[in-house]
Amino acid sequence: MFKNFVKVVKYLRRDPKHLRRFLLKRLATSGTVRDGVLILRGRHPQELLQKKIDEYVAEFVLCKICGCPETELVEKRGNMYLQCQAVLDHNYQVENI
C-alpha cells in the first residue's frame, strides 16, 4: 500500500496514471487507486517502493542534461518526450509506459 501516492504525484507534477502504470509494470503486479492510496497486490517493502520511485524520478522527472526537476512530459505523435522548462532546448524521448 502506498498511502501518500497523491501527495507524491502532486510533488512530482506528474499524471497519477503515469506513475501508477510505471509502478505496476516495474513491480510486476496489479493495483488500484482508492481515496488517494495506491493499493498494490502482494507484498512490497517500503524500501522497494522508494527505489522504484527514485527510478521514476531519474527517468521521467529529472532533466538528463542539466538535472533540473522542472520538466514536463509531452506526447508528440505517439511518443513521450521529457521537456526541460529551465532550458527549453533540452527535449528528449523517454519510454512509453
Image (spheres, rainbow, N blue to C red):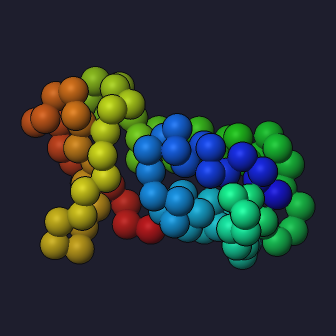
Q: Quadrant of the N terminus?
A: bottom right
Question: On the picture, is 53 further left or further right than 15?
Answer: right
Is residue 29 visible in the rendered image? The answer is yes
Question: On the picture, is 76 further left or further right than 18?
Answer: left
Residue for point 24% across, 36% down: 84
Question: On the picture, is 65 further left or further right than 88?
Answer: right
Query: Of residues 42 and 12, which is closer to you in this image?
Result: 12
| Above-or-below relation of 44 to 90 | below
Where's residue 72, x and y in %?
30, 46
Number of numbered discs present? Answer: 0
Name of the residue lying farthest toward the front: 35
Residue for point 70% across, 73% down: 32
Residue for point 49% across, 41% down: 12
Where's residue 18, x and y in %?
48, 62
Name of the residue lying farthest toward the left: 89
Residue for point 44% across, 68% down: 97
Where's residue 83, x and y in %?
23, 44
Q: Quadrant of residue 55?
A: top right
Is residue 26 visible in the rendered image? The answer is no
Query: Of residues 91 and 36, which is closer to you in this image?
Result: 36
Q: Quadrant of residue 38?
A: bottom right
Where's residue 52, x and y in %?
64, 48
Name of the residue lying farthest toward the right: 43
Question: On the picture, is 37 further left or further right than 45?
Answer: left
